[in-house]
Image (cartoon, rainbow, N blue to C red):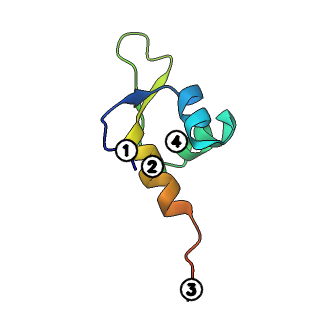
Amino acid sequence: MITESRLLRIEEAAVYANVGVSYIRKLIKTRRLKAIRSEGTGRYYLIKLQDVDACLESLEPKRTK
């Protein structure tokens, strides 16, 4: 897991997580993934890389021994 505090756009987060852009948008809309609107235009979201990691980790099915 990377601890860098880098901001990603939705498209970059989708590539990083190896999922579709619509899935990232759905996670943001349902508030499972934290995102902030860009300052100024507010046309796009910015997502912390560590929040993408945390979200994906929380969505993984729990494994039993």
SS for callout 3: loop
Q: Find the distance from the CA under tag 2 to the CA under tag 1.
A: 8 Å
The amino acid type of the residue labelled 4 equals: Ile
Marked residue nearer the N-terminal end (2 or 4): 4
Q: Residue at x 56, y 46 (%)?
A: 27
Q: Position of residue 55 (x, y in %)?
A: 47, 53
Q: Which amino acid, by three-letter code, is at mark 1?
A: Ile
Mark 2 or mark 4, whichever is nearer to me: 2
Is residue 65 toward the left or the right of residue 45 in the image? right
Disc nearest the viewer among 3 and 1:
1
Q: CA distance from mark 3 to mark 1?
A: 26 Å
Q: Amino acid at mark 2?
A: Asp
Mark 2 vs 1: CB contact within 8 A:
yes
Q: Secondary structure at mark 1?
A: loop
The mark that comes first in sequence, 1 or 4, is: 1
Q: Which residue is mark 2?
A: 53
- Which tag is nearer the camera, tag 3 or tag 4? 3
Q: Which residue is mark 1?
A: 2
Q: Secondary structure at mark 2?
A: helix
Mark number displayed over residue 64: 3
Quadrant position of the C terminus in the picture: bottom right
User: Comparing marks 1 and 4, which lies closer to the viewer?
Assistant: 1
